[in-house]
Amino acid sequence: MEIQDKSKLNLEDMKSGGFIKERKKDLFTVRLRVPGGRLSFEKMEKMAEVAKKYGRYGYVHVSVRQSIEIVGVHFDDIDAVIKELDSVGQKIASCGARVRVPTACGGCEYNPNGIMDAQKMVLEVDEKFFGRECHHKFKIGFAGCPIDCPKSSEMDLGFMGMVDPEWSEEECTGCTLCSKACIEGAIVSDSDGKPIYDPEKCIYCGDCINRCPTDAWGEKRKGWFVRVGGKHGRHPRSADDIIKFLPNEKVCDFIDKTVTWYNNNASGRERIGTCFDRVGLDKYKKEVVEDFKE
């Protein structure tokens, strides 16, 4: 997005492109695209350099959705900011009624609690869906495990990693570490120290698998717990639990069909959760979710 003629300036178009008008005359906040909150050193250095050169407040702002915002940029400097950031491949984010930059935790690469690769998925989803026009903002987030740091229940479409544990009696020594690790009470030990598993209490966190010293507990399956229709703000709404153990290879197809359904069924500036409340969640489940059930 190149800005040349101030006389033709449209603030809504500017905001959609990631340039948010500030209180002071001719000053803008430039929102940068940081899918999953991960930045290379090269991009961080360039952001700091550009912020020092063109920002007016002596700091940048990290948004609640992991974007970096360069604040206090004069209108006349916007083209220069775009050009300098582009030299390291740093893109501008967007606002408005479209699919936003997806957020994610660190996932399973280095976090011992991580089950699914949130960073891998967030990059794929950002590449395929960022900027797609919708009735209103559409936020997507990935949490690598049930600790759910990215708050999947507050997303228009949230994904949370989960693993289904499976016990092998042959490998079990009766050490009882699994029952001690399970704070949900899904595993208790019998008189011989062997686990008694209650799947109704399990939240699929994998703590039993991680704690087991003999690999008696293993992975039966893992995937994404999908939640749809959440939002925060003036009128918060908790997302509806939709499907369990969605595999990586079906995530983008699920997103595509969900956004298409949303655009076909929403009215005006309506979030997808509000659309559910108006037309009924069952309609969405029948027209989208049925295709993804096991």
Image: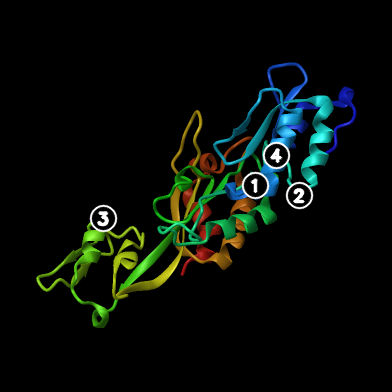
Q: Which residue is mark 1?
A: 263
Q: Earlier in the sequence, mark 3 or mark 4?
A: 4
Q: Which residue is mark 4?
A: 47
Q: Earlier in the sequence, mark 2 or mark 4?
A: 4
Numbered disc in front, either 2 or 1: 2
Residue 176, x across and y down, in percent: 19, 67
The amino acid sitting under disc 1 is Asn
Q: Earlier in the sequence, mark 2 or mark 3?
A: 2
Left or right, 31 with reference to 110: right
Q: Which residue is mark 2?
A: 89
Badge 2 marks a residue whose secondary structure is: loop
Numbered disc in front, either 4 or 1: 4
The amino acid sitting under disc 2 is Gly
Q: Quadrant of the N terminus?
A: top right
Q: Residue, x 80% and y 25% (percent of image)?
A: 75
Q: Which residue is mark 3?
A: 184
Of the pair 136 and 124, the residue shown nearer to us = 124
Numbered disc in front, either 3 or 1: 3
In the image as oriented, which residue stretches furthest toward the bottom? 170
Q: Are marks 3 and 4 in contact (CB under 8 Å)?
A: no
The amino acid sitting under disc 4 is Met
Mark 4 nearby-residue class (10 Å; few <14, some 14–19, many ≥20):
many
**Above or below 169: residue 36:** above
Q: Earlier in the sequence, mark 4 or mark 1?
A: 4
Q: CA distance from mark 2 to mark 1?
A: 31 Å
Residue 219, x across and y down, in percent: 38, 72
